[in-house]
Amino acid sequence: MKGEATIIKSQFGKADLFTLKNENGITVQIMNYGGTITSIKVPDRDGNFEDVVLGFDTFEEYLKQPFYIGAIIGRYGNRIANGKLTIEGKEYTLAQNNGNNNLHGGEKGFDKQFWEVEKYSSNDGFCMLSLNYRSKDMEEGFPGNLDVTVIYTLTPDNTLGVYYEAATDKTTVCNLTQHTYFNLKGAGNGDILDHALTIHADKYTPLDENQIPTGIEAVENTPFDFTKSTPIGSRINQENPQLKIGNGYDHNFVLKEKADIDEGLRPSPVIAKAIDPSSGRTLEIKTTEPGVQFYSANYLNGIKGKEEKPYAARSGFCLETQHFPDSPNQSGFPSTFLKPGKVFESITSFRFGVE
């Protein structure tokens, strides 16, 4: 018997926590600190529910962790080489918080901010949570006041939607994404190397030793070919210079197709699919973005997560839909510049199922 869609607000340390629940019993928890997804509970093929995203039991633990677990990333997701970018002839200097690079917005990106809750509701089987954040002019070195809205939705077909919108009063860069780590076995229940992954991309952006793209190359005949469903761990330890650079997968894939924003992702291609063979849980992703960063959690270091379970390297995976790394410095990549009077819009959906 189906239930009723609900959304409930509670306290989680200094943050507000919102629990979205659909008629099938699937729950998603999101806090306003970082717009962070703290929990997603979905059933396996036998109907047993498990929390399939990495996270922590207390708010304070989220403050301490350096891995961006579950958070909205901005103003610029991924890396910007040497912490430098030029906009309309003016050079801007950003924090170098990843070697020489600027990573995920700098020292205090969107993941470390309290977002304003604009509204939340459940109607006609849909749950919705709308969050706002104003990134002030020159915050973390980026020009322009950037007004950002992120809307999370949970639908009756077990889809978590993430809608991003942003506008600026000065020309700036904008590249927003979501940094949830998934383990379809359940958070802390071993590694994800047996998860079968498909990414509909026949090209990717290889990296130099500083993890900055050097161009675009074909995935064919490389460990980066996920055009057919392939276990994540089947080639991750191959002798390959690109895998050595990232200590595994930490690369941007150039999607063959992306959804049109006007279509609301329907109909649209599934750009990536993960399957856990043991539980039967599946995750399908659609997006309007041109790329997806596949990260196999190579640098998790055994930090204690939910229920004191350690999160070792490769105990989760991220599929961060976004524009390409270092796009402001690479003219051949899709542009991430945003001008006054223009609106940045992006949609990504995560659909959970079983097979």
Image (cartoon, rainbow, N blue to C red):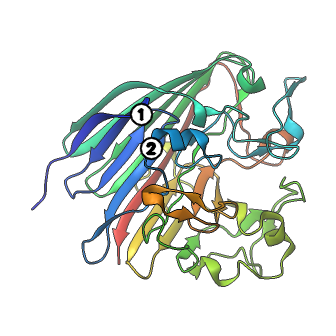
Confirm whether residue 268 shows in the render. no
Residue name at image x 69 percent, y 64 percent: 298
Residue under label 2, please give it: 58
Dividing the picture into quadrants, the one containing residue 130 is: top left
Q: Amino acid at mark 2?
A: Thr
Q: Quadrant of the N terminus?
A: bottom left
Dividing the picture into quadrants, the one containing residue 79 is: top right
Q: Position of residue 331 (x, y in %)?
A: 85, 43
Answer above or below: position of 92 versus 161: above
Q: Position of residue 255 (x, y in %)?
A: 64, 60
Front in this rendered view, residue 335 or 240: 240
* Left or right placement of residue 72 versus residue 32 in this view: right
Answer above or below: position of 118 versus 123: above
* Left or right placement of residue 307 versus residue 9 in this view: right
Q: Earlier in the sequence, mark 2 or mark 1?
A: 1
Disc 1 secondary structure class = loop
Q: Position of residue 323 (x, y in %)?
A: 68, 47
Dividing the picture into quadrants, the one containing residue 127 is: top left
Query: Residue 215 got which mark?
Result: none
Residue name at image x 69 percent, y 24 percent: 339
Label 2–label 1 contact, CB within 8 A: yes
Answer above or below: position of 108 versus 214: above
Front in this rendered view, residue 35 or 10: 10
Disc 2 secondary structure class = loop
Q: Position of residue 236 (x, y in %)?
A: 71, 77
Front in this rendered view, residue 72 or 108: 108
* Left or right placement of residue 115 versus residue 352 in this view: right
Answer above or below: position of 256 versus 102: below
Residue with the most extreme left position: 1
Instruction: Count neighbours of disc 1 (C-alpha within 10 A) and say few if under 14, some if 14 to 19, many if 20 or more.
Output: few
Residue under label 1, please give it: 13
Q: Amino acid at mark 1?
A: Gly
